[in-house]
Image: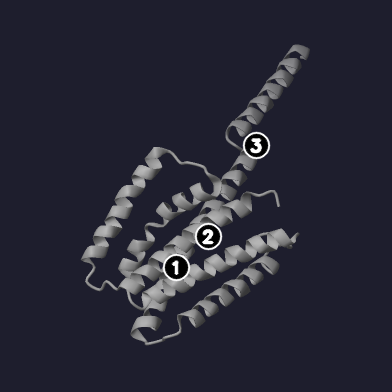
Amino acid sequence: MSTHGSYSMRSKASFENEAKATVKESGGGGSGGKSGKTMSSNSKENLFICFLVTLWYSSNIGVILLNKYLLSNYGFKFPIFLTMCHMSACAVFSYISIVFFKVVPQQMIKSRSQFMKIATLSLVFCASVVGGNISLRYLAVSFNQAVGATTPFFTAVFAYLATLKREAWVTYAALVPVVAGVVIASGGEPGFHLFGFVMCLSATAARAFKSVLQGLLLSSEG
């Protein structure tokens, strides 16, 4: 009886150990739940990033087409006023996103030097939007975007002038066909307008300069 009882107790204990091991292997333990939650949070974050990128592309395309319609087809002749509406909307929605939705933490200007850097960045960005809106009065949207493709070229030039940092030769070599393509497109564009082309090129250069200033401002200690 004692031998039979001890054997039964050992069998019961081994059965319980095997059941626990099976539960752990099947993901029923705490680690499996945590890994599942981590994968779920990562997938939600990836979906949110894809949504933001899609929204950014869609809004940019919509703004360009709407500006083209207002300035060329509708006959609206005030590109600077249109830029003011654009910048005001950016300021209002940025304030709402920061203060109410807490998209990024709110930061205050700490010094006069930081204020001057931010003001310079804002002026350059405003100049790029004004130049782009003026060019849409004279150029087709497709040609406007083709000229805008030279932004990496101007970015590389301004980055070298501002930081004296050279990129790899492959980077500069990749920019050659882009610039050459814009030159060829300019010569074959049926609706080419010199003043519109100059304004578009100026807007592209200002956009590249803004990117360099923004990189310097965000990488500083302040």
Instruction: Choose mark 2 or mark 1, whichever is in front.
Output: 2
State the image coordinates of residue 138 (x, y, percent, origin top left).
Answer: 33, 77
Q: Residue at x 42, y 71 (%)?
A: 132
Residue 46 appears left or right of 196: right
Instruction: Choose mark 2 or mark 3, whichever is in front.
Output: 2
State the image coordinates of residue 37 (x, y, percent, origin top left).
Answer: 61, 46
Pointer 1: residues within 10 angstroms few (<14), some, or many (20+)? few
Secondary structure under the numbered disc 3 in the rendered image: helix
Q: Residue at x 41, y 86 (%)?
A: 76
Secondary structure under the numbered disc 1 in the rendered image: helix
Residue 43 appears left or right of 92: left
Mark 3 and mark 1 residues within 8 Å of each other at the beta carbon: no
The residue singled out by tag 1 in the image is 60
Distance from disc 3 to disc 1, alpha carbons, whole Å, reads 44 Å
State the image coordinates of residue 122 (x, y, percent, origin top left).
Answer: 58, 67
Number of numbered discs: 3
Q: Amino acid at mark 1?
A: Asn
Sequence-first tag of 2 and 1 = 1
Displayed quadrant of residue 67? bottom left
